[in-house]
Amino acid sequence: MKSSAKTAANAERKSVVSRREILDAAAGLFRMKGYYATTLRDIAAAVGMKAGSVYYHFDSKEQILEEVLDIGIRSAFEAVRKSIEALPETATWRERFRVALNAHFASLFQLGDYLSANLRVFGQAPPHIYEQHIRIRREYDDYWRNMYEKAQAAGEIRSDVNLSALRLLVFGAMNWAIEWYKPGKKTVDSLADEYTRILFDGVGPR
Amino acid sequence: MKSSAKTAANAERKSVVSRREILDAAAGLFRMKGYYATTLRDIAAAVGMKAGSVYYHFDSKEQILEEVLDIGIRSAFEAVRKSIEALPETATWRERFRVALNAHFASLFQLGDYLSANLRVFGQAPPHIYEQHIRIRREYDDYWRNMYEKAQAAGEIRSDVNLSALRLLVFGAMNWAIEWYKPGKKTVDSLADEYTRILFDGVGPR
DNA sequence: GTGCCTAGCTAATGCTAGTTAGAAAATAGG
DNA sequence: CCTATTTTCTAACTAGCATTAGCTAGGCAC
């Protein structure tokens, strides 16, 4: 009974391990070179395998992409949601924004390459993959939209502010960071801080 | 004499026309599908040619990419510069920012596909092309940086504002717009207006 | 009409990438 | 250790892509 349970766990683990390694490597390569310029041979080599072996674990290169995209957005969404839930009920919307932004940047810069790979390649993914992926993306979008709406309802965002513009501006800032961020240059905390200050206080004279 | 001048003009025009058509088509296709998923056959078909014929006008697919990238950033830079130069000397830095932003969005959404193709594919361009391209990009970046510095020196941007963060936030917002902008949804003018207001006034209560 | 130049076509080339099927090696369990 | 299963390797295949070299047709000048 016990040894049987151990057998099942071990048998699962090698392929689970290899599968994860492949995904990790793919995420890193997609982020760095994009989907099309990354070959299966590249990915396989990164995990000490040959390209044909990858097919034991995945049906196709496209399936790898789908999973990388999915993991990327879900892990970010989860991190953002969790960090907000961990706040006290009394937290301001400004603080929630900062924390959410922080979690997003943490996902982008600290939790592996999945989100950055996602941001880098989703816009050019094969059409059917893009169409599938856009759904979860909209959910994430709505989550942020909802936050802005509540902040405005609570008076923390002025009523004259166009929330749609705000949302798009912020998403741009959040996501374009992959193009310029260099680890060590700026901590995720300070980045989220500064963006929050700029957005809530504005840069103009008081 | 007259017929000779006409000959030269006509002979130049056909290849100049075809060449431009190829670039226009390439810009559109790169924007839509990315560089790698766009084939020479796609580009050729879009201008009513066959793939082999494109080599009469360009040495390689990469050369087409280089030119699309270059035209994209240069046209934006030029538009921004021109629009600022057309302002009176007394214009505020806030107004200059708005006008520059407006010009950038106009380049992005109204002057063909070059800038949007650029933004979409430069991050995944072949390394030697990327390295070459990044130079002009830095010049554009510096132009904006310079604007913020002067605005801060003039007191129009508060001294406590981290200009580096501001710059990166704004670039993100400016450039990520390719991911969501749908013509007709919002005019370029109103977009630049709204972003300027959010950034200068902030969204928080006064 | 002839000759030259321009602009595009065509068939072919060479290479690469994703993928497959069978063999071999590694792992796991008794 | 042995056996069964899992995991990886390998050689090959096919399709597609960028590119090339030679040809052709049209336009223009003489």
Image (tube, coloured by chain):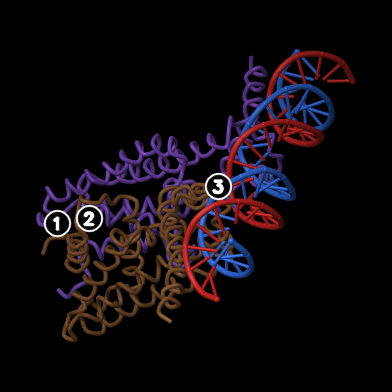
Chain colours: A purple, B brown, C blue, D red
Q: Are marks 3 and 2 in contact (CB under 8 Å)?
A: no
- Measured in 3D between alpha carbons, the distance from the residue under mark 3 to the one under mark 2, in whole angstroms, is 33 Å
Disc 2: which chain?
A
Image quarter of residue A143: top left
Q: Quadrant of residue C1?
A: bottom right
Which residue is the site of mark 1?
Answer: A161
Residue C20 location, x and y as percent? 67, 26
Whether residue B179 can be seen here = yes
Task: Look at 57% across and 44% down and name the residue there.
Answer: A26
The x, y position of residue A123, in whole percent, is 42, 47
Distance (Cα) linking label 2 and label 1:
8 Å
Going 30% across and 80% down the picture, which residue do you hit? B149
Left of B12 or right of it: where is B81? left
Q: Secondary structure at mark 1?
A: loop
Give the residue pinned by disc 2: A166
* Residue placed under numbered mark 3 in the picture: A36
SS for dot 2: helix
- In-front residue for pair D6/A85: D6
The residue at the point 14 percent across, 51 percent down is A152
Q: Please check whether the numbered discs 3 and 1 fall on a single chain.
A: yes
Asked if A30 appears above or below B144 in the picture, the reply is above
**Disc 3 residue type?**
Tyr
Work out whether mark 3 precedes mark 1 in sequence or the reverse, and give the earlier one: 3
Q: Amino acid at mark 2?
A: Leu
